[in-house]
Image: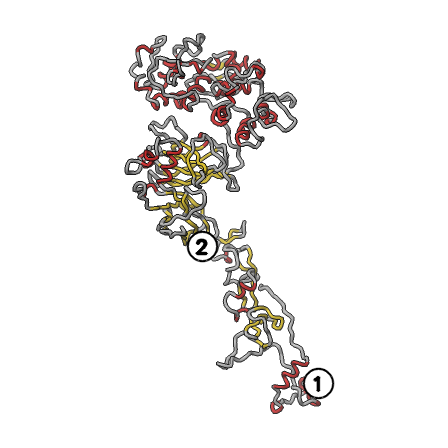
Amino acid sequence: MRLSLAFPRRFTLGLGLSLGLGACYDPDTLVEVDTEATGADTSASMTDPTLPTTEPTTDTPVTDSDPDTGTTAPGTTGGGCTADQALDDACDGATPYCRDGACVGCDALDNGVCAALDPAAPACDADLGLCVACTETDLEGCEPQQVCIDATCSPCTADAQCASMVCQDEIGECLLTEVVVQGTAVFYDQVASTPAAEVTIGVTNIDPAVMAGPTGADGAYQLAEIPPGTLLDLEMGLDQDDPVFVPASMHTRTQLRVENDTPVLYDPPIVTYAHMAQVAFECGLFPTLEAAIGNGAVNVYFAQRSTMFGRLVDDAGNGVPTVSRASLQVELDGYVNIHDNLLDGNANPAHVCFLDEDVSGRWVGTTAAASNDTGRFVMFRVRDPNGTGQGGATVRASGFDDAQVTLRSTGNIGVVELVRNDEAIVRDFAIDVYPIFTTYACVGCHTGGGPLAAVRAGFNADWDLPPLQVWQNLVGPGTTCGDPLNPLRVCTDNPEISLFVTNPLFDMVGMEDPHPVDIFPSIDDPAMQVILDWIEQGAQPPTAYNFTEDVYPLFSLYGCVGCHTGGGPPEAVSAGFNADWDLPAMQAWQNLVGPGTVCADLDNPLRVCTNAPGASTLVTYPLVDQVGMEDPHPLKAFPSLTDPDLQIILQWIAQGAQFEVTCEHDPCATGNLLNPGCSPCVSAVCQLDPYCCNTQWDQQCVNEAGDSPACGC
């Protein structure tokens, strides 16, 4: 049914009309009317010969003649209107508009007049003579997925209404037959969107391939005839010969899900080789920019594997800070790339660094351990199971939706965006919380046992120890705070009253706490939010490390096996156990822990001291000596105790120096040995009875768990 718009008819027998008709009246054409047949009263016409015998009807329009051609304009009626190409009160019905002094329908107006008169009614319904929102053949005023019903843009209700013959009933949208993708190619190194010229944009997963470009100075491109719903593999190519010639294998790649809309707007990014090399230098991977660029040709560091640029954003598109390097993963054809992956035998494993904005408006690399509020990151040296860099890549981070991109060639540069979801960002104590103590100089006071006044339930406030021991000092006094006026260091039942939260917070005027330093301006500070996240998630212990997966690969990574092989140095034999680390993992572990794992005399420590991890010769020997201190080890691999890989060794020792970490059963039941890092309960039992974490979790261990307030058995 069409829209019916009623206009009042303005045909009246007033003076003007009588005079007009009289002026054209010819008495010779008077026709006598049979009044008996018609029943009409002819008295007026018989007594006044100047009046016509019948009244003109309004059913047949009166047309205006063209003086030049003798023809009449279609759809025009009587003159007298003045609002040219617009509605006029002198016009009505199917001819409500005025053109050249004549009343016309919308089909007699110039093209585009309907839209100019009313943007909401750009179409012409010739039957009604009116400008309307749409017609069945003119849907320009509607959304691409809509149909026209009763001259109104409407959701579809049946397949037959849609050109594609598909109406998505649940949302009332027609599935489009094809869409257009368009936008501007932009340089990825610039903070402000900067168009990139001479860029080709290709779709490589549609046969035949679709291509656009090279782009002009404005960077504009368009891809037509794309089926809606398609996941496009986009490849952006740019000829580069400065600072070196760059092969096509180093093109930028990304993915785009095409919506059921047209046009789809997307600005594809271009990562130049010069920018990638600059970021690698700024991230500390190369001593000079020249070394990062390469010696006259692309650096094999980039060419032998692939690179992944990305951004962590919330649902409003803002960058997300405080996401650690270890939280990011790139899975390429089943191989999981993580930062400094110890199982990657290559001398240059995957490496994550975060980007920030500099004063010149560029995105630059940093050495930060976590993301800032830009959310930008890059992972270098992404590989597949074969050691090359091609295949389907999935980028992950806890608390974010996965993102995908196809790397069609080793050397490709992927670009992704990970969007925050409703899941919590999982915080690991060793990775996310423990570094805060050094970053904010907490260890300036909390060292060497910590302030004596801060000892609680026998647990020192010493944060300058390995991660597991710091964690134990934090949670040792308890983690449930029944009395809010006397909180503990960690309150998992009320995180915001935890002393670990309130003490370093800036105090309100008139409020005091015993902590001498205010570190965080408010509870909304990103680092404080990391602490709160960790407490809310149960104040879990640090990641438990396995010897085979985490420690053993370090012997090859740092070249230890160069000397510690074939039995190892003869002078290093201890208690009959060789110092040979070039054996299978189990045998290397037996050589390490064979002489013992508890060091009663710290002046003569063993290879592994679970009671004093920092004194272990496995830690002190490869560590650069302090001024005036020396040890007999010829190689110094680690510059300081805070080196991430040395922290892995320290934490592994602090957790009991186990060959394998097991948390496979409840500590209130018997089973295989457990690791101290499994829970505060297991840690408390193993401090009392090391047998439970070294050999077997037997009934005696269960009994000890039952007696421990940390367990609740």
Marks 2 and 1, Cα distance to the nearest angstrom?
66 Å
Residue at screen point 57% across, 15% down: 455
In the rendering, at what x and y percent does residue 615 appear?
43, 13
State whether residue 643 appears in this view: yes
Q: Crowding near pointer 2: few (<14 within 10 Å), some, many (20+)? A: some
- Residue 78 position (above or below residue 340): below
Residue at screen point 37% across, 18% down: 622
Residue pointed to by mark 2: 177
In this orientation, which residue lies closer to the viewer: 504 or 600?
504
In the rendering, at what x and y percent does residue 436 appear?
50, 26
- Which structural element holds mark 2? loop
In this orientation, which residue lies closer to the viewer: 242 or 265?
242
Q: Toward which corner of the image does residue 22 lie, by quadrant?
A: bottom right
In this orientation, which residue lies closer to the viewer: 546 or 517?
517
For the N terminus, give its image quadrant.
Answer: bottom right
At label 1, which amino acid type do we have? Asp
Residue pointed to by mark 1: 41
Q: In the shown orientation, is residue 572 left or right of residue 26?
A: left
- Residue 47 position (above or below residue 502): below
Q: In the shown orientation, is residue 25 left or right of residue 126?
A: right
- Residue 319 position (above or below residue 662): below
